[in-house]
Protein backbone atom coordinates (compact mmCIF):
# COMPACT_ATOMS: atom_id res chain seq x y z
CA UNK A 1 0.00 0.00 0.00
CA UNK A 2 1.07 3.54 -0.74
CA UNK A 3 0.67 4.89 2.76
CA UNK A 4 3.69 3.24 4.29
CA UNK A 5 2.09 -0.02 5.36
CA UNK A 6 -0.61 1.42 7.55
CA UNK A 7 -3.50 -1.01 7.56
CA UNK A 8 -6.38 0.31 5.51
CA UNK A 9 -8.88 -0.79 8.13
CA UNK A 10 -7.41 1.47 10.74
CA UNK A 11 -7.22 4.30 8.31
CA UNK A 12 -9.82 7.00 9.09
CA UNK A 13 -11.78 4.23 10.83
CA UNK A 14 -14.71 5.26 12.97
CA UNK A 15 -13.38 3.29 15.93
CA UNK A 16 -10.07 5.08 15.81
CA UNK A 17 -10.61 7.04 18.99
CA UNK A 18 -7.75 9.39 18.60
CA UNK A 19 -9.16 12.02 16.27
CA UNK A 20 -5.97 13.98 16.29
CA UNK A 21 -4.06 10.94 15.03
CA UNK A 22 -6.70 10.47 12.36
CA UNK A 23 -6.28 14.04 11.17
CA UNK A 24 -2.52 13.67 11.16
CA UNK A 25 -2.79 10.54 9.03
CA UNK A 26 -5.04 12.31 6.58
CA UNK A 27 -2.67 15.26 6.47
CA UNK A 28 0.32 12.99 5.76
CA UNK A 29 -1.60 11.24 3.00
CA UNK A 30 -2.70 14.55 1.53
CA UNK A 31 0.87 15.79 1.51
CA UNK A 32 1.91 12.65 -0.37
CA UNK A 33 -1.04 13.04 -2.74
CA UNK A 34 0.06 16.56 -3.64
CA UNK A 35 3.62 15.38 -4.32
CA UNK A 36 2.48 12.30 -6.23
CA UNK A 37 0.03 14.32 -8.33
CA UNK A 38 -2.96 12.35 -7.09
CA UNK A 39 -5.06 15.48 -6.84
CA UNK A 40 -7.20 16.68 -9.67
CA UNK A 41 -9.33 19.70 -10.44
CA UNK A 42 -12.87 19.30 -11.67
CA UNK A 43 -14.69 22.24 -13.22
CA UNK A 44 -18.30 23.30 -12.94
CA UNK A 45 -19.83 25.85 -15.31
CA UNK A 46 -21.43 29.11 -14.27
CA UNK A 47 -24.13 29.75 -16.86
CA UNK A 48 -25.84 32.90 -18.07
CA UNK A 49 -29.52 31.92 -17.95
CA UNK A 50 -30.63 34.17 -20.80
CA UNK A 51 -28.66 32.38 -23.53
CA UNK A 52 -27.24 29.34 -21.70
CA UNK A 53 -23.65 30.40 -22.31
CA UNK A 54 -20.85 29.40 -19.97
CA UNK A 55 -19.20 32.50 -18.59
CA UNK A 56 -16.94 30.84 -16.07
CA UNK A 57 -15.85 27.46 -14.73
CA UNK A 58 -15.19 26.95 -11.03
CA UNK A 59 -12.25 24.70 -10.18
CA UNK A 60 -13.07 22.19 -7.45
CA UNK A 61 -10.45 19.94 -5.93
CA UNK A 62 -10.78 16.18 -6.09
CA UNK A 63 -8.71 13.67 -4.17
CA UNK A 64 -8.94 9.97 -4.91
CA UNK A 65 -7.17 8.18 -2.12
CA UNK A 66 -5.57 4.92 -3.34
CA UNK A 67 -7.44 2.93 -0.70
CA UNK A 68 -10.25 5.12 0.53
CA UNK A 69 -11.56 6.35 -2.79
CA UNK A 70 -12.81 9.90 -3.18
CA UNK A 71 -12.46 12.10 -0.11
CA UNK A 72 -14.61 15.24 -0.15
CA UNK A 73 -12.87 18.62 -0.18
CA UNK A 74 -15.35 19.62 2.51
CA UNK A 75 -13.44 17.10 4.67
CA UNK A 76 -9.82 17.47 3.56
CA UNK A 77 -9.64 21.25 3.01
CA UNK A 78 -10.37 22.05 6.69
CA UNK A 79 -7.70 19.51 7.71
CA UNK A 80 -5.18 21.14 5.36
CA UNK A 81 -6.15 24.55 6.75
CA UNK A 82 -4.81 23.51 10.16
CA UNK A 83 -1.33 23.25 8.67
CA UNK A 84 0.78 25.01 6.08
CA UNK A 85 -0.28 22.40 3.54
CA UNK A 86 -3.22 24.60 2.52
CA UNK A 87 -0.74 27.03 0.97
CA UNK A 88 0.82 24.31 -1.18
CA UNK A 89 -2.57 22.91 -2.16
CA UNK A 90 -3.91 26.36 -2.98
CA UNK A 91 -0.91 27.29 -5.09
CA UNK A 92 -1.14 24.02 -6.97
CA UNK A 93 -4.84 24.62 -7.71
CA UNK A 94 -4.22 28.18 -8.82
CA UNK A 95 -1.47 27.23 -11.25
CA UNK A 96 -3.27 24.16 -12.59
CA UNK A 97 -6.54 26.04 -13.12
CA UNK A 98 -4.83 28.89 -15.00
CA UNK A 99 -2.86 26.48 -17.20
CA UNK A 100 -6.06 24.61 -18.00
CA UNK A 101 -8.02 27.78 -18.78
CA UNK A 102 -5.44 28.76 -21.41
CA UNK A 103 -7.01 26.09 -23.63
CA UNK A 104 -10.47 27.64 -23.34
CA UNK A 105 -11.97 30.50 -25.35
CA UNK A 106 -10.91 33.85 -23.91
CA UNK A 107 -14.50 34.70 -23.07
CA UNK A 108 -14.54 31.93 -20.46
CA UNK A 109 -13.14 32.69 -17.03
CA UNK A 110 -11.79 30.35 -14.41
CA UNK A 111 -12.70 30.62 -10.72
CA UNK A 112 -10.41 29.29 -8.00
CA UNK A 113 -11.32 28.89 -4.33
CA UNK A 114 -8.96 30.58 -1.90
CA UNK A 115 -8.95 29.55 1.75
CA UNK A 116 -8.99 32.34 4.33
CA UNK A 117 -5.78 30.84 5.75
CA UNK A 118 -4.13 31.16 2.35
CA UNK A 119 -5.46 34.70 1.93
CA UNK A 120 -3.99 35.70 5.31
CA UNK A 121 -0.54 34.49 4.28
CA UNK A 122 1.57 37.59 3.50
CA UNK A 123 3.10 35.76 0.52
CA UNK A 124 -0.25 35.11 -1.16
CA UNK A 125 -0.41 38.10 -3.56
CA UNK A 126 3.10 37.26 -4.79
CA UNK A 127 1.97 33.69 -5.48
CA UNK A 128 -0.91 35.02 -7.59
CA UNK A 129 1.42 37.43 -9.41
CA UNK A 130 3.82 34.56 -10.16
CA UNK A 131 1.11 32.30 -11.49
CA UNK A 132 -0.19 35.10 -13.74
CA UNK A 133 3.29 35.80 -15.06
CA UNK A 134 4.26 32.16 -15.52
CA UNK A 135 1.06 31.05 -17.23
CA UNK A 136 0.45 34.26 -19.17
CA UNK A 137 -3.30 34.13 -18.53
CA UNK A 138 -5.13 37.46 -18.79
CA UNK A 139 -5.61 38.54 -15.17
CA UNK A 140 -9.29 39.40 -15.66
CA UNK A 141 -9.97 35.81 -16.66
CA UNK A 142 -9.03 34.68 -13.16
CA UNK A 143 -11.63 34.97 -10.44
CA UNK A 144 -10.64 34.29 -6.84
CA UNK A 145 -13.47 33.01 -4.63
CA UNK A 146 -13.19 34.18 -1.05
CA UNK A 147 -15.54 33.67 1.87
CA UNK A 148 -16.52 36.09 4.60
CA UNK A 149 -13.98 34.43 6.88
CA UNK A 150 -11.21 36.47 5.23
CA UNK A 151 -12.53 39.42 7.26
CA UNK A 152 -11.91 37.67 10.56
CA UNK A 153 -8.64 38.75 12.11
CA UNK A 154 -6.32 41.46 10.85
CA UNK A 155 -8.63 43.68 8.80
CA UNK A 156 -5.87 46.15 7.86
CA UNK A 157 -3.81 43.34 6.40
CA UNK A 158 -6.89 42.02 4.60
CA UNK A 159 -7.58 45.40 3.02
CA UNK A 160 -3.99 45.66 1.88
CA UNK A 161 -4.21 42.22 0.28
CA UNK A 162 -7.45 43.20 -1.49
CA UNK A 163 -5.75 46.26 -2.92
CA UNK A 164 -2.73 44.31 -4.11
CA UNK A 165 -4.90 41.65 -5.73
CA UNK A 166 -7.08 44.23 -7.48
CA UNK A 167 -3.87 45.89 -8.64
CA UNK A 168 -2.93 42.63 -10.35
CA UNK A 169 -6.17 42.84 -12.31
CA UNK A 170 -7.80 39.66 -11.06
CA UNK A 171 -11.49 39.43 -10.19
CA UNK A 172 -12.75 38.78 -6.69
CA UNK A 173 -15.92 36.92 -5.78
CA UNK A 174 -17.55 36.70 -2.36
CA UNK A 175 -18.48 33.02 -1.97
CA UNK A 176 -21.25 31.43 0.14
CA UNK A 177 -22.89 34.81 0.63
CA UNK A 178 -25.62 34.88 3.24
CA UNK A 179 -24.11 32.25 5.50
CA UNK A 180 -21.59 32.83 8.24
CA UNK A 181 -21.32 36.14 10.02
CA UNK A 182 -22.88 38.21 7.26
CA UNK A 183 -22.21 41.82 7.91
CA UNK A 184 -22.82 44.19 5.06
CA UNK A 185 -20.20 46.63 6.25
CA UNK A 186 -17.33 44.96 4.44
CA UNK A 187 -19.08 45.30 1.08
CA UNK A 188 -18.39 48.99 1.53
CA UNK A 189 -14.64 48.65 1.36
CA UNK A 190 -13.89 45.31 -0.24
CA UNK A 191 -13.63 45.47 -4.02
CA UNK A 192 -15.71 42.44 -5.00
CA UNK A 193 -16.77 41.93 -8.60
CA UNK A 194 -19.25 39.21 -7.80
CA UNK A 195 -21.42 37.77 -5.05
CA UNK A 196 -22.18 34.08 -5.01
CA UNK A 197 -25.47 33.39 -3.25
CA UNK A 198 -25.18 30.32 -1.08
CA UNK A 199 -26.95 27.15 -2.13
CA UNK A 200 -28.98 27.05 1.09
CA UNK A 201 -31.26 29.84 -0.20
CA UNK A 202 -32.09 27.86 -3.31
CA UNK A 203 -32.62 24.65 -1.38
CA UNK A 204 -35.18 26.32 0.83
CA UNK A 205 -36.75 28.22 -2.05
CA UNK A 206 -40.14 26.51 -2.20
CA UNK A 207 -43.80 27.44 -2.43
CA UNK A 208 -44.01 27.32 1.37
CA UNK A 209 -40.88 29.34 1.99
CA UNK A 210 -41.35 32.65 0.20
CA UNK A 211 -38.68 34.36 2.28
CA UNK A 212 -35.72 32.63 0.66
CA UNK A 213 -36.83 33.81 -2.77
CA UNK A 214 -37.23 37.34 -1.43
CA UNK A 215 -33.76 37.19 0.09
CA UNK A 216 -32.34 36.11 -3.26
CA UNK A 217 -34.12 39.08 -4.89
CA UNK A 218 -32.70 41.40 -2.25
CA UNK A 219 -29.15 40.12 -2.68
CA UNK A 220 -29.43 40.48 -6.47
CA UNK A 221 -30.69 44.03 -5.98
CA UNK A 222 -27.91 44.83 -3.55
CA UNK A 223 -25.19 43.54 -5.83
CA UNK A 224 -26.69 45.33 -8.85
CA UNK A 225 -26.67 48.58 -6.88
CA UNK A 226 -23.01 48.02 -6.03
CA UNK A 227 -22.16 47.13 -9.64
CA UNK A 228 -21.40 43.56 -8.80
CA UNK A 229 -22.49 40.42 -10.61
CA UNK A 230 -24.44 37.68 -8.86
CA UNK A 231 -24.27 33.94 -9.29
CA UNK A 232 -26.82 31.77 -7.57
CA UNK A 233 -25.32 28.46 -6.49
CA UNK A 234 -26.85 25.02 -6.23
CA UNK A 235 -29.73 25.21 -8.69
CA UNK A 236 -30.78 21.62 -9.30
CA UNK A 237 -34.33 21.71 -10.64
CA UNK A 238 -36.40 23.62 -13.19
CA UNK A 239 -38.82 25.00 -10.60
CA UNK A 240 -35.83 26.38 -8.68
CA UNK A 241 -34.44 27.93 -11.85
CA UNK A 242 -37.82 29.58 -12.45
CA UNK A 243 -37.96 31.08 -8.98
CA UNK A 244 -34.37 32.23 -9.15
CA UNK A 245 -34.95 33.79 -12.56
CA UNK A 246 -38.15 35.53 -11.42
CA UNK A 247 -36.16 37.05 -8.59
CA UNK A 248 -33.68 38.71 -10.89
CA UNK A 249 -30.80 36.26 -11.08
CA UNK A 250 -28.97 36.21 -14.41
CA UNK A 251 -26.28 33.64 -13.65
CA UNK A 252 -26.52 30.27 -11.99
CA UNK A 253 -24.32 27.35 -11.14
CA UNK A 254 -25.73 23.96 -10.31
CA UNK A 255 -26.51 20.39 -11.25
CA UNK A 256 -29.35 21.61 -13.48
CA UNK A 257 -26.72 22.64 -16.04
CA UNK A 258 -23.79 20.42 -15.15
CA UNK A 259 -21.97 18.73 -12.31
CA UNK A 260 -18.28 19.38 -11.80
CA UNK A 261 -16.33 17.46 -14.47
CA UNK A 262 -12.72 16.68 -15.38
CA UNK A 263 -10.76 19.11 -17.57
CA UNK A 264 -10.89 16.72 -20.55
CA UNK A 265 -14.67 16.73 -20.45
CA UNK A 266 -14.72 20.53 -20.33
CA UNK A 267 -12.44 20.70 -23.38
CA UNK A 268 -14.63 18.21 -25.24
CA UNK A 269 -17.80 20.10 -24.50
CA UNK A 270 -16.27 23.45 -25.36
CA UNK A 271 -14.97 22.03 -28.65
CA UNK A 272 -18.26 20.40 -29.59
CA UNK A 273 -20.15 23.64 -28.98
CA UNK A 274 -22.10 21.92 -26.23
CA UNK A 275 -21.16 24.92 -24.11
CA UNK A 276 -21.98 27.89 -26.26
P1 LIG B 1 -17.97 25.79 -2.70
O1 LIG B 1 -16.82 26.65 -3.06
O2 LIG B 1 -19.19 26.45 -2.19
O3 LIG B 1 -18.27 24.93 -4.02
C1 LIG B 1 -19.56 24.57 -4.45
C2 LIG B 1 -19.90 23.15 -3.99
O4 LIG B 1 -21.26 22.90 -4.29
C3 LIG B 1 -19.10 22.08 -4.71
O5 LIG B 1 -18.91 21.00 -3.80
C4 LIG B 1 -20.06 21.67 -5.83
O6 LIG B 1 -19.82 20.38 -6.34
C5 LIG B 1 -21.37 21.74 -5.09
N1 LIG B 1 -22.50 21.96 -5.99
C6 LIG B 1 -22.55 22.64 -7.15
N2 LIG B 1 -23.79 22.65 -7.68
C7 LIG B 1 -24.56 21.93 -6.85
C8 LIG B 1 -25.95 21.57 -6.86
O7 LIG B 1 -26.73 21.90 -7.76
N3 LIG B 1 -26.39 20.81 -5.81
C9 LIG B 1 -25.56 20.42 -4.80
N4 LIG B 1 -26.09 19.65 -3.83
N5 LIG B 1 -24.24 20.74 -4.75
C10 LIG B 1 -23.76 21.50 -5.77
P2 LIG B 1 -17.48 20.29 -3.62
O8 LIG B 1 -16.79 20.20 -4.93
O9 LIG B 1 -17.71 19.05 -2.84
O10 LIG B 1 -16.67 21.32 -2.74
C11 LIG B 1 -17.04 21.59 -1.41
C12 LIG B 1 -16.28 22.77 -0.87
O11 LIG B 1 -14.89 22.45 -0.73
C13 LIG B 1 -16.31 24.01 -1.76
O12 LIG B 1 -17.53 24.69 -1.60
C14 LIG B 1 -15.12 24.77 -1.22
O13 LIG B 1 -15.46 25.43 -0.03
C15 LIG B 1 -14.15 23.63 -0.90
N6 LIG B 1 -13.18 23.48 -2.01
C16 LIG B 1 -13.25 22.72 -3.12
N7 LIG B 1 -12.15 22.88 -3.88
C17 LIG B 1 -11.35 23.77 -3.22
C18 LIG B 1 -10.05 24.35 -3.49
O14 LIG B 1 -9.41 24.11 -4.54
N8 LIG B 1 -9.58 25.23 -2.55
C19 LIG B 1 -10.28 25.54 -1.41
N9 LIG B 1 -9.74 26.41 -0.54
N10 LIG B 1 -11.49 25.03 -1.15
C20 LIG B 1 -12.01 24.15 -2.04
CA1 LIG C 1 -16.57 28.37 -4.38
CA1 LIG D 1 -20.08 28.47 -2.61
CA1 LIG E 1 -18.97 26.40 0.64
Image (cartoon, rainbow, N blue to C red):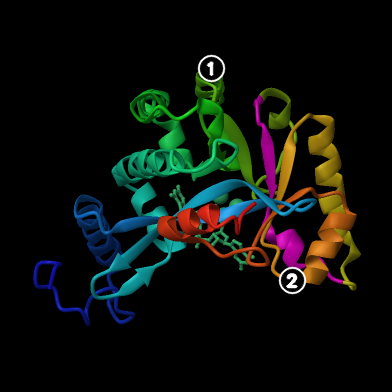
Q: CA distance from mark 2 to mark 1?
A: 39 Å
Give the crowd class for mark 2: few <14, some 14-19, many >=20 residues within 10 Å.
Answer: some
**Is disc 1's CB within 8 Å of ligand 1?**
no
Residue 179 appearing in the image = no
Q: Is residue 100 visible?
A: yes
Contact between marks 2 and 1 (CB within 8 A): the answer is: no
Q: From the viewer's perspective, is 40 left or right of 272?
A: left
Residue located beneath label 2 in the image: 237
Local packing at callout 1 (Cα closer than 10 Å; few below 14, some 14-19, many 20+) is few
Q: Residue furthest front?
A: 272
Relative vertical location of residue 239 with respect to residue 80 in this rendering, above or below: below
Which residue occupies the foreground of this view, 80 or 100? 100
Q: Residue 8: x and y, percent? A: 20, 79
Residue drawn at x 85%, y 63% as measured from the top left:
242
Residue wearing tag 1: 167
Disc number placed over residue 248 in the picture, else none? none
- Left or right: 116 as drawn, with respect to 48: left
Residue 50 among magenta residues: no
Give the mark nearest the N terminus, 2 or 1.
Answer: 1
Image x and y of residue 105, in percent: 54, 40
Q: Which part of the image, by quadrant, shows the N terminus? A: bottom left
Judge whether 210 appears above or below 107 on screen.
below
Give the vertical position of 8 relative to 3 (above or below): below
Q: Is residue 96 above or below residue 156?
A: below
| Picture coordinates of residue 158, whole percent (x, y) | 53, 26
Quadrant hosting residue 133: top left
What residue range appears in magenta? Answer: 190-206
Examine the image and state in which quarter residue 140 appears. top right
Amino acid sequence: AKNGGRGQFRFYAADLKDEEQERQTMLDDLRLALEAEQLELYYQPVVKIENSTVVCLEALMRWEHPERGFVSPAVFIPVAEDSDLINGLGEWALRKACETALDWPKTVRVAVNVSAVQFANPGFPAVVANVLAQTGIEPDRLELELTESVFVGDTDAAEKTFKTLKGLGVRLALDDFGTGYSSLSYLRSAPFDKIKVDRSFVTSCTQQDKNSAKIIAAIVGLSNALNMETTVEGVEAFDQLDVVKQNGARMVQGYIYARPMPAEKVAERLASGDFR
